[in-house]
Image (cartoon, helix red, strand yellow):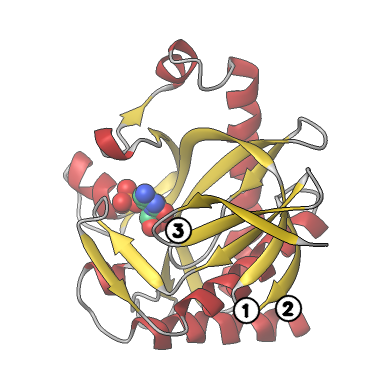
Amino acid sequence: MEKREIIFEGNEKQVFATDDQDQVIFRYKDVTVAYNNVKRARFKGKGALDNQISAILLSYLNEHGVETHYIETLGEQEQLCRKIEIIPLQVVVHNRIAGSLAYRLGVPEGFRHENVIVDLRYNNDELEDPFINRDHAVALGLATYQELDRMYDIARRVNELLKPLFLQAGIELIDMKLEFGRASDSGAIIISDEISPDTCRLWDLETGERMDKDRFRLDLSRVVENYRNVLERLQKVIKS
Ligand code: C5P
């Protein structure tokens, strides 16, 4: 497999074409951004940690019947992925209310609820990723109702699989953002993009300490140390 030209340059990752039209190479950078790119920093080693954590979670999903774009890890910061047509939506699953949802609903962070909440956002930097509903997404031609049903079903399944996996690692999965695409090899709706402490809220089960990107967002320090802790705990669970 041959690495070819760059086809996407994001803040936190790069995507390269390969000599296979259905495969791309994903490269995780050490750069991190927050608040719609207003806050930015570089953490040495973070790209490699995101790459490894994402590889564990995405291959776990692949092995449990949830199709994702992940194929294999190529190097410290790179993984081989199935090529997708991007669906510019974010499906956010909440097990407890935190972050912007806590602000929107006027409840304290960590608010407990019985049901699982699934939110939809339009992935659009200029509009600051606004919350939308299914009708908006269909009206804009972003996805069909059938595709949205499929994305919601997959998102709930991902949560059912990852919540207990994190629990075994002594971590509570508070919320997570998922992105989807249409696989170029089959047309199937599959999970694209990473799943990592950058895209999830992860709280230590015992201490409640944040182990995710909120450490950067809220200037809590020890960002890389916490990401490494998440990786080491997941590695232990996967090995056992
Ligand atoms: O920012 P907010 O509180 O709405 O985030 C909800 C979840 O989605 C968090 O886990 C956050 O890390 C993730 N998220 C993301 N990318 C965004 C916005 C939120 O991964 N652009």
Q: Quadrant of residue 57?
A: bottom right
Q: Residues within 10 Å of mark 3 (few under 14, many from 20)?
A: some
Q: Earlier in the sequence, mark 2 or mark 3?
A: 3
Distance (Cα) linking label 2 and label 1: 6 Å
Q: Residue at x 64, y 46 (%)?
A: 191
Distance (Cα) linking label 3 and label 1: 16 Å
Locate residue 148, reporting x and y percent: 58, 25
Q: Nearer the viewer, residue 97 or 218?
A: 218
The residue where tag 3 is placed is 199
Q: Earlier in the sequence, mark 3 or mark 1?
A: 3
Q: Residue at x 82, y 33 (%)?
A: 186
Report if the beta carbon of the residue with label 3 is closer than 8 angstroms to ligand 1.
Answer: yes
Can residue 89 be seen at all in this image of the molecule?
yes
Q: Are marks 2 and 1 in contact (CB under 8 Å)?
A: yes
Distance (Cα) linking label 2 and label 3: 20 Å
The answer to whether 96 is drawn above or below residue 230 in the figure is: above
The residue where tag 1 is placed is 234
Q: Amino acid at mark 2?
A: Ile
The residue mark sitting in front, 3 or 1, is 3
Q: Residue at x 44, y 77 (%)?
A: 205
Q: What numbered label is drawn on residue 238?
A: 2
